[in-house]
Amino acid sequence: MNSLQELIAQTNCQKLRRRWLLGNWHSQFGKEKFAPYLETYSQKILVDLQKWELFEMAEAAYSYFGDISKMLGNDFAPMLSTLIPLAIKSCISEDGIKHEYEEKKKEDFSLDSDSEEEGNLKGVTVRTAFLDEKTASLHALGLFSLQCPKAFLPHMPNCLKTLETLWDYFNEDVRYQVVQTYQQFVESLNLAFYGTENHPTQIPGFPPKVKMGDDAKKLYFETVLPKYIRHLKSDDDREVVA
């Protein structure tokens, strides 16, 4: 575990991305062996996420907590009230989009303006790391909903409002992740309805063994399905359509 302690101590961006490994190491060491280190490492990464200094830092943190949620299952529930607002904030953030304007000439000044406004928009720059953080936060929300379906229910309305703002986002990777997260939310509602222990396993290619719960059915038919159909008809990205 000394190598884990070395990883968690790193602070620069390049080394911080190695923290993704922490969430996967439990598969090698097992939940019981990883447990003594879990609180310390998780708290350190949470502090970094709350300080939010880099897009890459947030992306790595969401990846870590998503993996840890798969390890802990319902025991991850106490973390939801802290992590979900942070993930939603990342989802709706526009900090990685920079609008570039032409320099306004003095002779262009108009008495109609209350102040010296910027010139005409000449371009928009979007940070790739910004988009990666957004997709990572969406992916984390989906995993949280599946691992803690009942505890996630109070957060579902705000999360659905967030997806509503992103389902037709200009970036195809974000749209693709929204499609996946909608699917996970529907499954989460069904898990909350039946319980994770009694929920039947779905076999791909075969009819479902049980009917969908009312909440899951309402979400799917009233919200998700219409958006899926619009993607099928008009989205130009093959992965989103698929």
Image (cartoon, grey):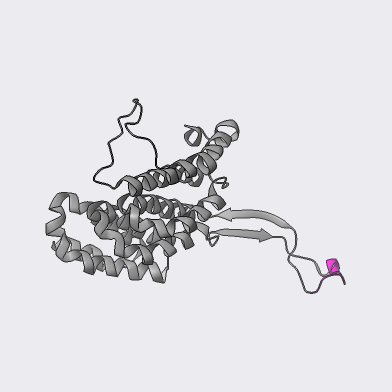
Compared to 91, does 219 lie above or below? above
Check the picture and name the quadrant holding the N terminus. bottom left
Locate residue 52, reporting x and y percent.
42, 68
Q: Residue at x 77, y 72 (%)?
A: 116
Q: Which residue reaches farthest top?
A: 205
Compared to 131, does 203 lie above or below? above
Locate residue 213, reporting x and y percent.
39, 42
Compared to 228, does 73 lie above or below? below
Magenta segment's dominant SS is loop
Locate residue 198, reporting x and y percent.
25, 43
Q: Which residue reaches farthest bottom?
A: 115
- Lateral position of residue 159 relative to residue 62, left or right: right
The question of residue 217 being in magenta is answered with no
Q: Residue at x 42, y 44 (%)?
A: 186
**Residue 236 in view, yes or no:** no
Q: Nearer the viewer, residue 137 or 55?
A: 137
Q: Nearer the viewer, residue 11 or 184?
A: 184
**Residue 88 in view, yes or no:** yes
**What are the residue bounds of the magenta stretch?**
107-114
Q: How many numbered circles does the render carry?
A: 0
Q: Nearer the viewer, residue 26 or 78?
A: 78
Locate residue 73, reporting x and y percent.
25, 53
